[in-house]
Image (cartoon, helix red, strand yellow):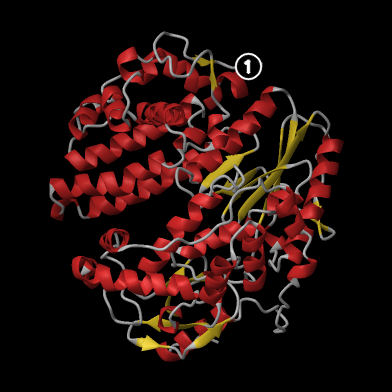
Amino acid sequence: MIIRDPQEVAETLNNFFTSAAREETGQAKPTPDCSHIADLSRIQQNLTPKPPLSLKKTNFTEVKEAMMKIKTNKATGCDQIPPRAIKESAEILCHPFSELFNYILNKSRIPQQWKLGEVTPVFKKDCSLTKSNYRPITILPSLSKVFETLVHTRISPYFEDIFHEHVFAYRKHHGTDTALLSLTEQWRKELDQHNIIGIVSMDLSKAFDTLPHELLVAKLKSYGADSKTTDLVHDYLANRRQRVRLGDQFSNWKETSVGVPQGSVLGPLLFNIFMNDLVYAVKQSRLSAYADDTQIFFADSTPEKVEEVINADLAHVDQWYEQNGMRRNTSKYQAIVMGKTQVKPQFHCENIAIPITEDLEMLGVTVDDKMKFEKHIAKICRKVSQQIAVLKRMKKILPFETRKCLYLAFIIPHFNYCSETWHFCNKSAIAKLEKVNERALRFVFNEKQRPYSELLDKIGLPSLENQRLAKIVCTVFNVINSEHAPKSIKELIGFRNNKYNLRGSDILKRPKASTTTYGLKSWRFTAPKLWNSLPDSSRTVRTFKAFKNSIRTLDLSGLL
């Protein structure tokens, strides 16, 4: 049945979003008994002793800074106080707000008004008439976000050395690019050693919306949070209510008893804290997680061993999900096998065979079992070509500056998204990308005859290949100069001598490679080679901005 009345649609969506913790039968899913959850003991066993986490008082200077950083283009919550009003009143209101925030920190009680969220349904994909294809994004009161920011700045640093190195989401200096680069480089290394890799990509249903509150608080306590911190987080999660807004229509308010609000400042951090101990459940496989997008993999010389280890760890992960109140979507589990083998390993979850495919869609990148990325390159070319075709229809009404802005904002990002991961594709794919980029530039400048190199000079950008190589050396610069660089990326680089001796031609070690496809054509081999080829004047600069300026005019492809 198709519902057309906006009020009824809003009510239907709100009922669906707030019942995300129910089984398909309509029965409420019980919250796990924290006292009997084995993960809590695993947390304590893997935790390095450190002082307890406590939330220190704030002051008007910190509050003012937080108020000034609030994004004014965000929607207004149900309190009808626009973010711009918060920002522009920071100079005056930071004093009373600092007293209010300190009172809340002392009492560990959140104002009920701050627990009211207006939900905007955001369409994901497939059929727009299906309610399960919408994601609830919560718009919270602006003042609540300021307070959450202050709490986040106290909790987040405490967990930076607790979070597993392969937990990539919602962390500073981490992202989809580092997650994929870390994974694919591990796989290339195993393939270079002629091993077989079994990879299983797992899927959760509405992970943010089904997270059990009591268990999250128990985990926070196990990680070392003091009673005031756990009480505050418990109160932050308790008695939350939401309504769906569609245009000028609202649903009724409904209480949410599980989950963390998507769209909040604290929600992603709390989700990472909750999911972090999943890695302790995996015995021999390696795990990588980006939010609820999780992969486990294992490499060995024999397919039998790969099958045995993966299936054993799948059972452990499945048990963890069950104990932690997470809803698996086994119908969306997929597997891929890399490496030469006559016998393909078979993987199972809940006695259901996991389909083995030739490629996997991971964080927006299509990874194939040969690591050629041909399908991904074709996808990029198709998307960009479609955009160019649409823009060409409006060519006569779009001035040059608008065409240039559209190119830089909507076309170039397709070419550069996670490009360090798929840079090592074949020459024909590289040529295809440059050809599509040339078409885009001819649209921007309305040029039909001018050479591609001159179009690049006019737009002020190097070739796509040089842009990807620039990203590689920029990553190396960050690894060398920043102590906050992801550990998983730091492990890809080896230093010959003292890493602070940046002069000379052999600064970084080049690993031994057995094959061209997976050894020589890899980030871990290309990055040090390229870095060592840079002039000393580039390698010795101290700021990232200065480094980017120093390599802007270099032909990096000519250095390889």
Mark 1, Cα crowd under 10 Å, few <14 / some 14-19 / many 20+, is some
| Residue 549, horizontal then vertical, whole percent | 26, 27
The residue beneath circle 1 is: 513
**What kind of residue is marked 1?**
Ala
Q: From what the image shows, is residue 138 above or below residue 62? A: below
Which one is in front, 441 or 181? Answer: 181
Which quarter of the image is occupied by the C terminus? top left
Question: Is 38 left, or right, of 517 in this rendering?
Answer: right
| Residue 158, horizontal then vertical, whole percent | 53, 51
Q: Is residue 130 visible?
A: no
| Residue 164, horizontal then vertical, whole percent | 62, 45
The residue drawn where x is 28% and y is 78% is: 81
Q: From what the image shows, is residue 102 above or below residue 255? A: above
Question: Is 448 left, or right, of 494 in this rendering?
Answer: left
Quadrant in the picture for residue 152: bottom left
Question: Is 560 left, or right, of 27 in this rendering?
Answer: left
